Image (cartoon, helix red, strand yellow):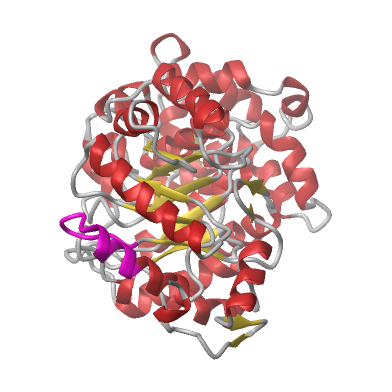
Amino acid sequence: MELASTIRGTRYRFASVKEVLAKANPPKSGDDLAGVSARDAVERVAARAVLADLTLADLRANPVVPYEIDEVTRVVEDDLDDQAYRAVSHLTVGQFREWLLDVETTGPTLRAVSPGLTPEMVAAAAKLMSNFDLMTVGAKCLVVVRANNTLGLPGRLSSRCQPNHPTDDVEGILASAREGLSYGCGDAVIGINPATDSPESTAEILTAIDDLLRRNEVPTQHCVLSHMTVQMKALGDLHCPMDLMFQSLAGTEAGNKAFGISVKLIDEAWAMMKERGSTRGPNRMYFETGQGSALSSQAHHGADQVTIEARCYGLARRYKPFLVNTVVGFIGPEYLEDGPQISRAALEDHFMGKLLGLPMGCDACFTYHARMSQDELESLKVLLGAAGCTYLMSLPVGDDIMLNYQSTSYHDIPTLRRLLHKKPTPEFDAWLDKKGIWHGDDPGPMFGDVAAVK
């Protein structure tokens, strides 16, 4: 098939579907760094014109990394629901976008079609959408999951309590966790990024957090974000409690190899969690992603970072995770340069993950050398909340003392809930009321008091 479009008398030709996808992408510093972006705005328009006329069947037939050389592509293709695929395969990308935005296309309809979509399809649609479009469709996609509580119900906004400590001091972690819980944070997970990536440290932190949650009867989950192999040793050899198992994912086999993982390893971890995990389930895995990760390890195969990010979600859905989180501005300005690019990426990722059937959260954040202001970050949190984002991060004053980046603070979460008329998970909401921390939409007498959690 010819991949070409004429704009103002100039004929623009593209060598492959992969090139069309890349050059149709909104401006991203990472695509510029990879040398795959459009030369100018006119070429970008030409690429979008070509993309709009491709069918979803064309995109399935042309994954950006071939089936023969990439296990992520094989997982997506081999697990695809053919009946759901046939319902939309005839649509062009332009028609697919219009169908997604149609008010008669409801959340249950999107959920039914989701297993038949490939990452390239949802990435293609994202490239033809405005930020408002991405929010509109993202808000329609409801993905409900359960571990120790129920995540993703309508009218809910959850948070990960992130009580990191630069030396993994357990008492410091517990103090920060108690503060977060007293602000109504942590219904998605109490998740700690460890400074020491060892089974012993992982087990020690998990055991301490588990004791805190049990003593206070907190209906949530815990997780330590060490490497998957470290968590497997902590669970298998040290027999520690573990509600969720974590791993960062990339969108290509080579990118995952750089992370020290493979589909076989994740399969083993998933099986171990189903057998030994302490959560009531059935959703037991936690994955994090971020645009640019494959480029940083030279594992992007010449594809753009939005499409590669979508492929992360195509892999993640194999494991029916409880949480998936795009850490949207964490890698740095080499990949997302400023506030507009970071905000755009957050809305793209949320839309793509939700459409692929994942309970998408977002770490709305930036590193200190990116050109993003606090006002832009706060605006992004509101956009994500309005778009139906399942959960956001929460940490002391929004400034992580261990990872050194700016994110969402403990006090942002109750503010967002009140602003957007949203609540935490039903089980956590009832617990907050019982503890006197929060009564419906109003702070309780123990609001913000760490003494509320012993």
| Residue 279 appearing in the image | yes
Residue 393 lies left or right of residue 423; in this view the side is left
Residue 243 spot, x, y in % from top left: 49, 43
Q: Is residue 319 above or below residue 408?
A: above
Closer to the camera in the image, 343 or 304: 343
Look at the image and give the residue range highlighted in magenta: 163-176
Q: Quadrant of residue 57?
A: top right
Question: Image height check: is 240 above or below 446?
Answer: above
Q: Is residue 256 above or below residue 191?
A: above
Residue positioned 35% across, 46% down in the render: 224
Q: Is residue 302 visible?
A: no
Name the quadrant of the C terminus.
bottom left
Q: Nearer the viewer, residue 134 or 450?
A: 450
Is 346 left or right of 35, judged from the image as shown?
Answer: right
Percent of width and height locating residue 139: 65, 60
Residue 218, picture quadrant = bottom right
User: Residue most toward the top?
Assistant: 68
Residue 121 on image: x %, y %:
58, 35
